Image (cartoon, rainbow, N blue to C red):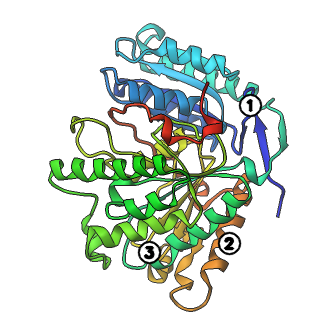
Amino acid sequence: MAEMRGFLRSDGRKGIRNVVVVAYLVECAHHVARRIVTLSDDMDVHLIGFPGCYPNSYAFQIMTKLCTHPNVGGVLLLSLGCESFNREALRQAVAASGRPVETLVIQQAGGTRATIEAGRAAVARLKAIAGQTPVVPMARHELVVGTICGGSDGTSGITANPAVGRCFDWLVEAGATCIFEETGELVGCERIMSDRAVTPELGAEIEACVQKAERYYTIMGFGSFAPGNAEGGLTTQEEKSMGAYSKSGSSPISGLIKPGDIPPTGGLYLMDVVPDGEPRFGFPNISDNAEIVELIASGSHVILFTTGRGSVVGSAISPVIKVCANPETYARLSEDMDVNAGRILEGKATLDEVGAEILDLVEAAAAGDRTASEALGHQEFILTYKSFEPVGPACLPTRGRAA
């Protein structure tokens, strides 16, 4: 296997990709941004954006963290011109991170065709500058890995999810940072997670965040349980929760973060994805990609995506490794999958063997290998409105807190 290598950024972090992102700042600029990306015909030019015309501090923070992610080497901001998004503040944040950044305003650039042509030229310039980024060796402890499950079925909690948990344990043991989330799908597991917290205070925060999620879904009138979950053999929210929980492995939980928070040290972190306060913006995450975006905004170099029913999505910015729980699903969708964890169910592999395979694929992705979703061109992305309060002091490791 090739050695892991990183693109060295000015803040000392290393990325495993060197993409140029074209970021639209309102839905009115989405089409022009997409045409710029499509015409570039380059797998390392990615489209991201926020559709809302009205301001949202969560969206601004997420966009800032994405545009300054270690996997990003250059940024083109695309504005219509009259939206509320603070494009100049975002431009300054990207420039301060040491990355090349350009801004185009459609209303000033002459409309659709003129902006597309200007955008293509800007992308070429940004790629040339990003191509000069130093490439250096990367160690396992420098990795940040997130995990999510989507299209779960009755096999997820006994094959793919615990295999990811094994991989997480080995990564944490090596000093890497691992993030699991889906607090709305961890209802009933709060006491178990609390017992794994490194401090009693953190344990109390974990219990409170899951209780917040349960209350949020009660007010909404439904929980995080899709029709496909039931059709796939899951019977209750609690059963689904235990399966989702198994992705976390067995390491102590070092901290509790919210979307866009960068874990200050290595270890295992739980991400609270359910908004604070009364429900204002509907369902917390309207799709799997909304959660993937939050994991990436918190620094994830790569995402481990487990699925039983089958999902084909990837993501912009960070590669997605697909771990298929169900051998029948794998037989139908093998082109879209990286790992067949259903072999555990068939008695053809152990949890440790599949966990080791997942770890090998993480390191292969960090060495530059394309995942299945990358090779197929998947770069799904979505960002919506949310509202969060900062985490409390008990949520982060003592040595990682700001002075």
Q: Answer with the quarter of the image where residue 234 lies.
A: bottom left
Q: Earlier in the sequence, mark 3 or mark 1?
A: 1
Q: Residue furthest bottom?
A: 347
Q: Answer with the quarter of the image where residue 22 lies.
A: top right
**Coordinates of residue 369 in the picture (x, y in percent):** 72, 57
Q: Is residue 397 left or right of residue 35?
A: right
User: Disc number at residue 357?
Assistant: 2
User: Disc number at residue 157?
Assistant: 3
State the residue at coordinates (57%, 37%): 262
Q: Which residue is label 1 attached to?
A: 9
- Secondary structure of residue under mark 3: helix
Whole-number angstrom distance, CA of label 2 to CA of label 3? 18 Å
- Binning the other alpha carbons within 10 Å of mark 1 as few (below 14), some (14 to 19) or many (20 upward) gives many
Q: Residue furthest front?
A: 200
Q: Is residue 9 left or right of residue 342?
A: right
350 vs 239: above or below = below
Looking at the image, how many numbered discs can be counted on the residues?
A: 3
Q: Answer whether labels 2 and 3 touch (C-beta < 8 Å).
A: no
Q: Amino acid at mark 2?
A: Glu
**Coordinates of residue 325 in the picture (x, y in percent):** 48, 75
Q: Quadrant of the C terminus?
A: top right
107 vs 248: above or below = above
Q: Is residue 53 left or right of residue 132?
A: left
